[in-house]
Image (spheres, rainbow, N blue to C red):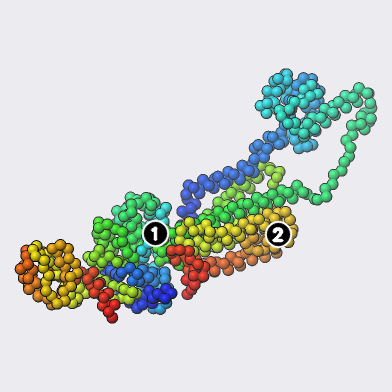
Amino acid sequence: MKRFGDVVALDGATFSVAPGRIVGFLGPNGAGKTTTMRAIFGLVRLDRGEVRWRGKRVGPKERARFGYMPEERGLYPKMKVGEQLTYFAELSGMSEESATEAAAGWLERLHLGDRADARLEELSHGNQQRMQLAAAIVHDPELAVLDEPFSGLDPLGVESLAELLKQIAAMGVAVVFSSHQLDLVEDVCEDVVIIDHGRIVMSGVVEELKAASPHRSLEVTVNGEPWVPILPSGTVTNKQGARLRVLVDATADVEEILATARQAGEVTSFTFEPPSLTDLFLDAISEGQAA
Amino acid sequence: MNGALKRVWLVTRREWNQRARTRAFRISTLISIGIVVVLIMAPEIYGGGDGNRRTIGLVGASSAQLPEVLEASSDQLGLSVKTRRFADEPAGQVALRSGDVSVLLVDQQRLVWKADPDEQLQGIVISAVGALERQRAIEDLGLTSEEAQRLLRAPELRSTSLERATEEQTARADLGRIGVVLLFVAIAFYCGFVLVGVVEEKSSRVVEVLLSRVRPTELFAGKILGIGLVGLAQFALVVVSALVALSFAHNTLAPDTTPSTLGWIVFWFVLGYAFYAVLYAAAGSLVSRQEETQSLQLPMTGVLFVAYILAFVATESPDGAAALLGSFIPPTAPMVMIVRIAHGAVPWWQIGLSVGLMVATVYGIVQVAGRIYAGGVLRFGGRVRLKEAWRGAES
């Protein structure tokens, strides 16, 4: 638990991460994501509670095996990127030799092998972002904690970063990243933890959570008369021209819906699938508020 | 090496590498050395020619003994005078205008100057010419050698001074002043680096990346040590160059105690830097942007300036109560003690006490400042209040 004056920033935020998994730590702005992450690294002191890793309370020794990429990006702008990565690796306890090797390896992996002697400020914006990530994981941590790694990236950047995260996870690293843009990270995270007002409102494997949801997402495009399916629990979540997106009961009769849609006009698209991350998130938060 | 020490060392090494390996550092070191060496050698290079050596141009009739007599009488005054003969006055005037000769003596009767007469040189010429005239008169009168000696005997005038060795004391006071200026500039300069360095890490947010790996106190210590080493290296290089230059320069302005005093200046730089750097680093942790540092460093710069002023007061009365007290109080001790050491022998127990107080105080403020730094450095946004930073680091 963490209080800032009267504001309770964190209250019972318990969740776990497993090696090799990518965990999306999601929640609206101000939910407590950054505070949680900083608490893992001792950058904020918890008023109550503790962070555990492999059953042990996290101290400096454990933290040396973690990597952190803060939300506010920052490295030394005038320092050469190779030296910089080596420095961070050494600070995390690597020997000079293996730090130099690790730094070179990461620069190669990020296609920056020939820029080792460039100052950070000479790199493009996108490459500086990649450097930031490299600085967080250069020492081969067991756990990588990335605060809003996707913010400010264009779709191409998101895709290449997602690819990188998958590579990192494949190396056996537990990757936790936070985001408030759920649609952006839908395909990236395998596990998800949703936080709101300092409380964890949902956590688990994304596919399982989706499957377990009492709702399904129905998306129909009908060219013809305006058409609204008659469903007891249906609420129109999105309507764009002829396209309609509705969250319906998981038990709804798909055939029947399709039939009524066909009566209304020509059906050009029809999907019936587990809800999106955004739907789960909204569900979880409204339940949390109702409770 | 245990983890904490190794991390402090890594931070220190980075500061050293990023600062001492740059071209800017090399250039600024060379410029500082150049300035100091030129200042010391200046009397040798310029003053030596003008100050100690004169050439007197001779035109027309003059005694054959004149050059010898001129040299002998100028020697007594610490000047080295040579003569040069010219065929006629115009030729002599050309040399006078170009500065090759200091004065023209025409027919042993007239002195021609380029501009204002040099009174010292004028005196030498007049007394030399006068001696020769008397010599001739003695010969004309046919006096015995006894009578001549009596006539020519210089009056015996004894000199006493009310205050002993004033020249030496002035030189020592000057040395003290130079030491104070050097210390003030060096402390303000390198502590400025510490302040900027701390704020830089905070404003660029790299501090969060760092503090996920090192403890705030480790970063704090490494930064101060690293910049301190750079400062010490540069400062010591300048001082050693000054010593080398002095050994070549035979600078009469420098008292014999100069080498040891310079050594003390380096020693007190270390203590003074430690004291102020710790304060500057703590102050830097309270702001998030470089623009905010101006008002923030005012209190420390103010104290440093007070120390500077007090040190200058102390040069006026190095044995006074203010100087004695000031050489024990940590904020003023480095500069005031230098003035006292330059002035004369300071009892060892006093130096020991002053150093002891200084070290104890630095140890004390490291505890306080380190905690303020730890509490302040991760608080972003506006200016962090002292109380907030202090509480922020509560464990």
Three-letter residue code for mark 1: Gly
Whole-number angstrom distance, CA of label 2 to CA of label 1: 48 Å
Residue A100 % position (x, y)? 38, 57
Residue that badge 1 annotates: A74
- How packed mark 2 is, by other alpha carbons closer than 10 Å (few <14, some 14-19, many 20 or more), is many
For the point 91% across and 26% down, which residue is it? B138
Camera-nearest residue between B105 and B7: B105
Please tell me whether residue A115 is drawn above or below residue B124 in the rendered image. below
Reading the image, the residue beneath label 2 is B323
Residue sitting at x 61%, y 65%: B359
Report whether mark 2 lies on the same chain as mark 1: no
Who is closer to the viewer here, B298 or B329?
B298
Q: Say what amino acid the circle numbered 2 marks.
A: Ala
How far across and how far down the image is residue A64, in percent?
39, 68
Quadrant of residue B279 in the image? bottom right
Other-residue count near label 1 (Cα within 10 Å), few / some / many at <14 / 14–19 / ≥20:
many
In the rendered image, residue B107, in percent from the top left (x then y), is placed at: 79, 21
